[in-house]
Image (tube, rainbow, N blue to C red):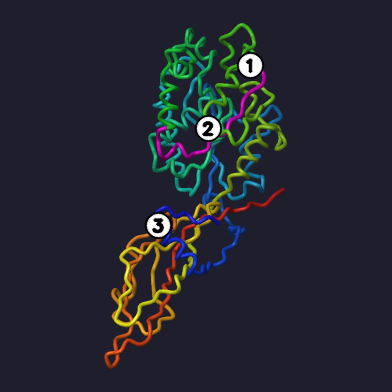
């Protein structure tokens, strides 16, 4: 494990590691939840958010398979609740802006106790991905619970079809989703996202359609020929580069209607979910003992800011929360001040700042004999997050 030290001078650092010993409390690599865990008690919730001119039935395949139900009965998601969000978006001549719909979405999720969960993740289709981002920007406290968003065909750079449709339909959403050069809405949304300290840490994973949409299918009715509703570049703009975007061999509407758990749309979300497991917070303690502190006869050894490091495991997102300091293995100490030593502050990167002081033995018969010896033990309380591994099929 790496020890993050930025405040310790090189000479002091050498002294600390030459005279210190580390003692760590063992912790498990995984954690478990009770077998009788009920819906509503699960630590994570998966929220489905449909797109433009759709409703909660948008996730149903032609064979009747319903994506949320496939997930509810899949043991690989047994630690997550499933929520189907819905907002009003009529098939033509809608009147609400994206900001208004984002507020409606927020209120419905609040009413359904979505934000009572420790973690929230989103599956969003098309406009749904835009609304999710707007909503989270307005509610940073709840956004801190969101681990990732998986967007399917979300037009992060707009859609040419939305631009064409806006000629025939004055729904304000079509202007928001247009790829016209004078549309600053999407550009500003992305700028706000990247500049916001809370939301810019949320992972965004993307899937894109590979087939054109038929003229009589959804938004495609505004055209006389087949067309790609959202291009590859628009669907994948701004998404995490560590996970390649997923191609879905379907048109814009069918891409979110997996017929079974082996479908690419379903499997893509599962792989993202598996690679970003639920994290369970717990506290552990870990010690660092600084040995070899001495003071000769009638001499004082003191330090107003001894910086004592502890190793932190970045894979568990560890942070040092607090620390206490004590003297151990003391021999001939005198005038200990303060008693016990005091930790004045703890840096999150694992450095405790300790104030201590003690004197060596006093003279006997005007002669200095002996030397004080002591070790300084600093016990850290460390916050860490253990991944929860769900059952596999």
Outermost bottom residue: 365
Rendered residue at 39%/55% (across/down)? 7
Q: Nearer the viewer, residue 344 or 32?
A: 344
Q: Residues within 10 Å of mark 3 (few under 14, many from 20)?
A: few
Nearest to N terminus: mark 2 or mark 3: 3
Rendered residue at 57%/26% (across/down)? 236
Q: Place residue 253 in its image quadrant.
A: top right
Quick one: SS at disc 3? loop
Image spot of residue 374 (x, y percent): 41, 78
Nearest to N terminus: mark 2 or mark 1: 2
Q: Is residue 311 above or below residue 340?
A: above
Q: Is residue 187 above or below residue 71?
A: above
Residue stretch in magenta: 195-212
Would residue 280 be visible to someone looking at this image? no
Image spot of residue 280 (x, y percent): 53, 55
- On the image, numbered disc 2 is attached to which residue? 49
């Amino acid at each position: 494990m790496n020890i993050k030290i930025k405040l310790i001078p090189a000479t002091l650092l050498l002294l600390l590691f030459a005279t210190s010993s580390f003692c760590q409390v063992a912790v498990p690599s995984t954690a478990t939840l009770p077998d009788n865990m009920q819906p509503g008690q699960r630590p994570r919730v998966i929220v489905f958010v449909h797109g433009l001119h759709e409703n909660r039935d948008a996730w149903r395949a032609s064979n009747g398979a319903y994506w949320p139900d496939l997930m509810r009965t899949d043991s690989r998601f047994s630690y997550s609740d499933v929520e189907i969000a819905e907002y009003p978006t009529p098939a033509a001549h809608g009147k609400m802006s994206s900001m208004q719909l984002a507020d409606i979405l927020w209120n419905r999720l609040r009413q359904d106790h979505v934000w009572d969960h420790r973690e929230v993740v989103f599956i969003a289709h098309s406009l749904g991905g835009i609304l999710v981002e707007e909503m989270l920007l307005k509610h940073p406290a709840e956004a801190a619970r969101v681990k990732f968003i998986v967007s399917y065909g979300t037009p992060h750079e707009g859609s040419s079809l939305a631009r064409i449709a806006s000629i025939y339909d004055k729904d304000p959403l079509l202007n928001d989703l247009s790829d016209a050069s004078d549309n600053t809405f999407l550009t500003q949304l992305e700028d706000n996202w990247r500049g916001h300290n809370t939301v810019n840490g949320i992972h965004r994973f993307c899937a894109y359609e590979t087939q054109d949409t038929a003229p009589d299918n959804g938004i495609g009715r505004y055209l006389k020929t087949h067309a790609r509703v959202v291009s590859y570049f628009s669907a994948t703009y701004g998404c995490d580069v560590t996970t390649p975007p997923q191609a879905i061999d379907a048109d814009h509407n069918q891409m979110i209607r997996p017929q079974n758990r082996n479908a690419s749309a379903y499997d893509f979300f599962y792989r993202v979910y598996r690679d970003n497991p639920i994290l369970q917070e717990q506290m552990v303690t870990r010690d660092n003992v600084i040995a070899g502190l001495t003071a000769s006869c009638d001499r004082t050894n003191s330090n107003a800011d001894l910086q004592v490091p502890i190793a932190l495991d970045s894979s568990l997102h560890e942070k040092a929360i607090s620390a206490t300091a004590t003297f151990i293995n003391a021999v001939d100490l005198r005038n200990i001040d303060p008693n016990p030593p005091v930790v004045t502050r703890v840096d999150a990167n694992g450095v405790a700042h300790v104030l201590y002081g003690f004197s060596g033995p006093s003279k006997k018969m005007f002669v200095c004999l002996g030397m004080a010896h002591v070790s300084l033990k600093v016990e850290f309380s460390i916050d860490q997050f253990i991944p929860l591994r769900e059952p596999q099929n």
